[in-house]
Image (cartoon, rainbow, N blue to C red):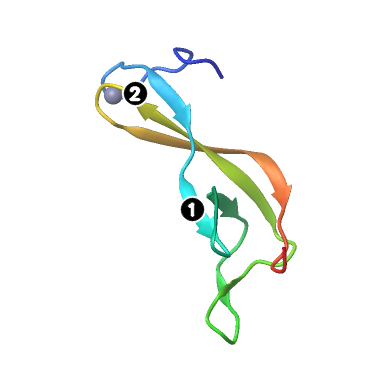
Amino acid sequence: MEKGDRRCSICGGVMVEGFILDFYKENQTATRWVEGKPEKTFIGAVAFSDRQNYHITAFRCDQCGYLEFFAIEPQVLKDRE
Ligand SMILES: [Zn+2]
């Protein structure tokens, strides 16, 4: 989406597209939405092997800072990638 396509539902400001930065195995990556409830492995990590997951697109209002999230790009992410 282009800047200016979306307007803030709180104040009417312009919603700017971005993403939430996260770390996965010490590398910077975009945060994802994963289907189902989190399950812990024996070492305490979250297991998500072969579950449907999506990159999260975040829109931020350039006036009030309101955030909206969308999960529209499906990915397959395995525990051992
Ligand atoms: Zn706003």
**Residue 20 in the image: x percent, y percent?**
46, 44
Q: Among all residues in the image, which is located at the extreme top?
A: 4
Q: Residues within 10 Å of mark 2 (few under 14, many from 20)?
A: few
Amino acid on which disc 1 is placed: Asp
Which label sits on residue 42? none
Q: Note whether 69 is above or below 13 in the view shown.
A: below
**66 relative position to 24: left or right:** left
Q: Note whether 2 is above or below 28 in the view shown.
A: above
The residue indicated by pointer 1 is 22
Q: Secondary structure at mark 1?
A: strand
Amino acid on which disc 2 is placed: Ser
CB at mark 2 closer than 8 A to ligand 1? yes
For marks 2 and 1, the one nearer the N-term is 2
Residue under the image location 63 percent in, 46 percent down: 54
**Residue 21 in the image: x percent, y percent?**
47, 47
Q: Note whether 19 is above or below 63 in the view shown.
A: below
**Residue 79 in the image: x percent, y percent?**
69, 68
The residue indicated by pointer 2 is 9
Q: How many angstroms separate mark 2 from mark 1 (CA)?
A: 26 Å
Q: Quadrant of residue 73?
A: top right
Closest to the observer, 81 or 66: 81
Q: Secondary structure at mark 2?
A: loop
